[in-house]
Amino acid sequence: MHRGKGMKFVGDSRVRENDDRHIPKDYSEYPGRTEPFWPNFLLKEWLAGAVFLVGFLCLTVAAPAPLEKMADPSTPGYIPLPDWYFLFLYQLLKYPFASGDYVVIGTVVIPGLAFGGLLLAPFLDRGPERRPTRRPVATSLMLIAIVAVFFLTWEASSHVDWETRAEQNKIVEDVEIDKESEGYQVYSDQSCMSCHGENLEGVSGPSLIGTEHSADEIKDIAKNGIGSMPAGQFEGSDEELQKLADFIAGLGEE
């Protein structure tokens, strides 16, 4: 017998000659329902990712995240906070069932189950259905996770005074403080450093370096208070108040 005569070459000898049930149909038979992975599907994914990335970059340029000064563990008034995408875990640790004696549940067990389930999702739910209504278990778990993350993030952010925090922890230029000046002596005698720091860098109160207030405004604030600062904090004479106001107003001026 010559090669190629009277012989059929097939991938599996158990498949009959005229049996086309195991041969995949052409993509043209499913218009609008499926497409080749390369390049059609992958190109669409890249375009969608590029649009999202460009939009995210524009958002960061239009509203940049405020940077804080370096953390100082010796500062008693500083409250550390994680980045916004971890605020939901930060809020979770405030509840009794996930803190204190049960802190392992909040730091290991609950996050481990959540992220472990996310990693194992393709293996736990391998159903062919694509409609959310026909996959109630997977859809319900995803909705619960989304609601929980949004709720915990909202709860954590609603208890933070972001404007005051940004003012207190903003990055300020290093300014040499003349601690021998009369203004600084008044500053230290009036216990101002308990809120504004030894170098006026800000502790529980805002930094006084490079303030936008004039000397007259500083005198008024020292007597009448502002924001969370109550009135009557300054108890010295008018002359001492003027020295203090001139000292603070002159910090950071070139």
Image (cartoon, rainbow, N blue to C red):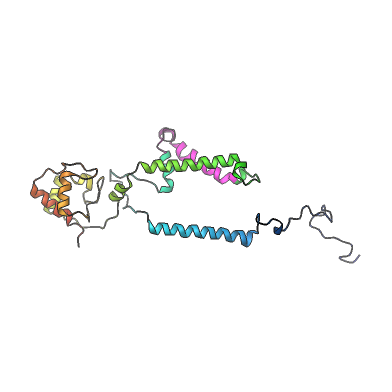
Question: Residue at horizontal 34%, vertical 43%?
Answer: 160
Q: Where does the magenta region start and end? A: 93-121
Q: Is residue 91 above or below residue 183?
A: above
Q: Is residue 247 left or right of residue 148?
A: left
Residue 179 appears in the picture as rendered:
no
Q: Secondary structure of the magenta portion, mostly? A: helix
Question: Residue at horizontal 13%, vertical 49%?
Answer: 185
Question: Residue at horizontal 51%, vertical 60%?
Answer: 50
Magenta-drawn stretch contains 115:
yes
Q: Quadrant of the C terminus?
A: bottom left
Of residues 185 and 226, the one drawn nearer to the viewer in this rendering: 226
Where residue 36 appears, as percent x and y from the top left, is: 65, 59
Q: Quadrant of the N terminus?
A: bottom right
Where residue 171 appears, as percent x and y from the top left, is: 29, 55
Of residues 57 and 89, the one drawn nearer to the viewer in this rendering: 57
Q: Is residue 188 left or right of residue 32?
A: left
Residue 141 appears in the picture as rendered:
yes
